[in-house]
Image (cartoon, rainbow, N blue to C red):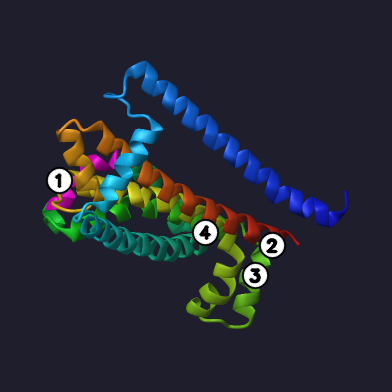
Amino acid sequence: MTPGMKKRAGPARHGGDALLLIVVMALLWQMGSWLLGADALPGPWRTLVQVQREVSDPDFGANLAETAKAFLFALVLAIVGGVLAGLYLGVRRLAGDVMEPVLIALYSIPKISLYPVILLMFGLGISAKVAFGVIHGIIPVVIFTMTAVRNMRPVLLRSARSYRLTPWQTAVHVLVPATVPEIVAGIRIGFALTLLGTLLGEMFASQRGIGHLLMLAIDRHNPPTIMALALMLFIFATVISIGLLQWDRHLRRGTST
């Protein structure tokens, strides 16, 4: 097999594996629906029909826009704040040694227990949802970035000092390029947790958004709507995660060559 044929066979094989995985998951889903009953677990076809109904609802667009706005704000704050804090703690080793166990402890706390505090600080509205999303997603970004800075070659920082670069120039021209693969890995985890935090914020104290729709469906015991919203969220999170994973692999191949 020639190198060109191998390159073409790789994506085809991955595509076949992905299709097989989707088919197996759909079959298991349908089997679960048969075993538990369609009223408890709607099957794939019924869920897809419900997805079409939800999307065609006049209020769905406004709820989707509300969730998207809160999630994007939270994600940007989690990434920017996490990267900046991780760079600082990675360079300042003493501060990093002090804060690392604190971050791990905060990461292990069920964030839902902090929601009353968030409500008292930010009140009802988009600010509370953004804050709840940030506290979920920022810690993985900080930890991955801090670890990446600690593991980078010391000669890079010595070179920055010898060229008398400012802290900002060092961060932009040395630290970030050297740690991008690990930062992207942290963003992958932070993305999923930020989405989770935003949706939880909408479920418990919001009058709009996808999380609010999901909570209404749970209160009304409406499994088709629950499954339809869950499927849409699953597809969105999976597509973005695959894109970030491919970006991560591309960066790591570039750094290894």
Residue that label 2 marks: 255
Left or right of residue 170: residue 159:
right
Circle 4 packing at 10 Å, graded few (<14), some (14-19), many (20+), is: many
**Element assignment for label 1:** helix
**Element assignment for label 4:** helix
Residue that label 1 marks: 116
| Amino acid type, callout 2 | Thr
Q: Is residue 161 above or below residue 22?
A: below
Residue sitting at x 17%, y 44%: 204
Q: CA distance from mark 4 to mark 3?
A: 17 Å
Q: For the stretch drawn in magenta, what is the main secondary structure?
A: helix
* Tag shown at residue 183: 4
Magenta residues?
Answer: 110-119
User: Which of 161 and 230 lies nearest the eye of the viewer?
Assistant: 230
| Amino acid type, callout 4 | Ile
Circle 1 packing at 10 Å, graded few (<14), some (14-19), many (20+), is: few
* Tag shown at residue 156: 3
**Element assignment for label 2:** helix
| Amino acid type, callout 3 | Leu
Q: CA distance from mark 1 to mark 3?
A: 45 Å
Q: Which is more N-terminal, label 3 or label 4?
A: 3
- Foreground mark, 2 or 3? 2
- Foreground mark, 4 or 3? 4
Point out residue 33 in the picture as x, y percentages from the top left corner: 37, 23
The C terminus lies in quadrant: bottom right
